[in-house]
Image: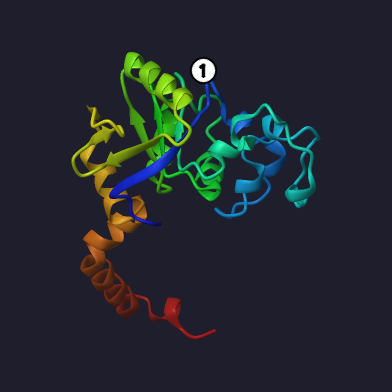
Amino acid sequence: MEPFNRHTGLVAPLDRANVDTDAIIPKQFLKSVQRTGFGPYLFDEWRYLDHGEPGMECSQRPQNPDFVLNQPRYAAATVLLARANFGCGSSREHAPWALRDYGFRAIVAPSFADIFYSNCFKNGLLPVVLDEGVVDQLFQAVYDASDYRLTIDLPEQVVTTPHGDAFPFTVDPFRKRMLLEGLDEIGVTLAEQAEAIRAYEQRRAQEAPWLFAAR
């Protein structure tokens, strides 16, 4: 998983509240358990005018010109600005997979659904909670500028605008560490307990050698 430290990126405004995980990545794309390949299908039902299915060549599909990600000014966005309760609905981990595979590194919103919020940290995506009034200001700023970028500093836990306005945010220390080091929970366990794991495997091999015999 790619670590997250300090990121400056173009902002795309998704001005909808209660965006659920089925909108982020529709159910027909959940057949794969690989973490990659979902980016072309992100927001599929909003992004395209036809019905999407796994394996389709998306470059040839008719796009919805009114959807934000299809507008040229937001084509290279890596920060998503969203409204309240982003990521509600089912607990599918495919939702942060699709956002990350598309190219987003962070999402800024007034609130997130709990499971989606947790899943983001496990997949290299930083969810930033800011006050709703601040988010309103950011939406207006994005609409007013053609190339609006935010800098998100995870070590300092602050979002900075092009004009120097700084908005602090909070993040759980353990989740912060996961992103800074590019680790999920399993990676953290392996890093902290490597010696204990090796000692157990060596002891187990002596106690039950038949389990480790070559097949």
Within the image, what quadrant is residue 173 found in? Answer: top left
Left or right: residue 181 versus residue 65 is left
Spot the residue most to the left.
Answer: 156
Left or right: residue 168 versus residue 46 is left
Within the image, what quadrant is residue 172 found in? Answer: top left
Q: Is residue 113 visible?
A: no
Q: Could you say where residue 137 lies in the image, as x and y percent from the top left? A: 36, 18
Q: Nearer the viewer, residue 74 or 132?
A: 74
Within the image, what quadrant is residue 53 found in? Answer: top right
Q: Secondary structure at mark 1?
A: loop
The residue identified by callout 1 is 17
Question: Does 3 appear above or below 194?
Answer: above
What quarter of the picture does the N terminus occupy?
Answer: bottom left
Q: Nearer the viewer, residue 138 or 125?
A: 138
- The residue drawn where x is 32% and y is 50% is 4
Number of marks in the image? 1
- Crowding around mark 1 (Cα neighbors within 10 Å: few <14, some 14 to 19, many 20+) is some
Left or right: residue 158 versus residue 24 is left
Q: Nearer the viewer, residue 200 or 59?
A: 59
What quarter of the picture does the C terminus occupy?
Answer: bottom right
